[in-house]
Amino acid sequence: MLIQYYILLGAIALVSWLVSSTLKRKFEKYSKVQLRNGMSGAEIAEKMLADHGIRDVEVISTPGRLTDHYNPKNKTVNLSEAVYNQRNAAAAAVAAHECGHAVQHAQAYNWLQMRSTLVPVVSVTSGMSQWVVVGGLMLGAAAGLGFGYYVAVAGLVMMGFATLFSFITLPVEYDASNRALAWLKNKNMVSQEEYAGSEDALKWAARTYLVAAIGALASLVYWGLQVFGGRD
């Protein structure tokens, strides 16, 4: 049972690594495409927020690489040091994408609200769900024994929330990228070459979330089969 699961995890990890490696190469490539307007990632972000009438969101620098994110709790667009300071197509893409989340928040985008609602639940349950399922199986869930079965089902429910969160994240991320690209193009913020680089970089960034969602679903299905498939 566990051998099959580890094979599944290995396959998903391999695909994830390939996508992540490609993403890093893309960002390195487009980091060399300098913006003709000379604006930094921070300036791009501040202009996009202003153009959408958002005055209560702060753009700040955060340590690390590819650590960029929007924090709806304190309304901050957090840009990694490279993105915050650099003036290239990759930085413009990331900065605009994170501002896309700020625009979603300001406009009460439904998928973002749904994801935010699930955050407290997933943060508590995601790390323990697999162990709860395994514990239930060890207690006899597959044989149809009552207590072990209910423990395993509880673990599957926890895992289900994490899987749901992963799939809800997809429209949130794709929509943020679409908002970013539309703004970059409509406001003539980038040249045709710069736009192509920004679009390609965001496309590969979105694929990391797609792989994560598929991995979460595959894991849920696998453990579901172990719990329900072994019952008489």
Image (cartoon, helix red, strand yellow):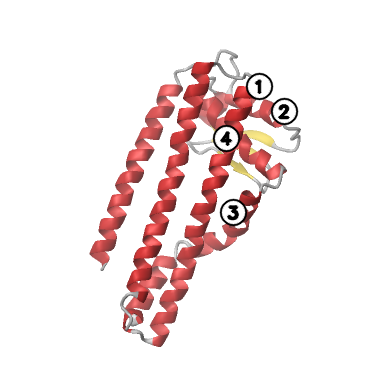
Residue 175 picture quarter: top right
Q: Which mark is residue 51?
A: 2
Q: Residue at x 61, y 29 (%)?
A: 182
Mark 3 or mark 2: whose residue is earlier in sequence: 2
Residue 194: image location, x then y, percent: 51, 19
Q: Which mark is residue 61?
A: none
* Front: mark 4 or 2: 4
Mark 1 or mark 3: whose residue is earlier in sequence: 3
The type of residue carrying mark 3 is: Arg
Q: Secondary structure at mark 4?
A: helix
Q: Is residue 28 above or below residue 129?
A: above
**Is residue 65 visible in the rendered structure shown here?**
no
Disc 1 crowd rating (10 Å Cα; few below 14, some 14-19, many 20+) is few
Q: CA distance from mark 1 to mark 4?
A: 14 Å
* Front: mark 2 or 1: 1
Residue 181: image location, x then y, percent: 57, 29
Q: Secondary structure at mark 2?
A: helix
Residue at image mark 1: 187
Disc 4 crowd rating (10 Å Cα; few below 14, some 14-19, many 20+) is some
Task: Count the marks.
Answer: 4
Mark 1 or mark 4: whose residue is earlier in sequence: 4
Mark 2 or mark 1: whose residue is earlier in sequence: 2
Residue 43: image location, x then y, percent: 64, 24
Q: CA distance from mark 4 to mark 2?
A: 16 Å
Q: Nearer the viewer, residue 21 or 80?
A: 21
Residue at image mark 4: 178
Q: Secondary structure at mark 1?
A: loop
Mark 4 or mark 3: whose residue is earlier in sequence: 3
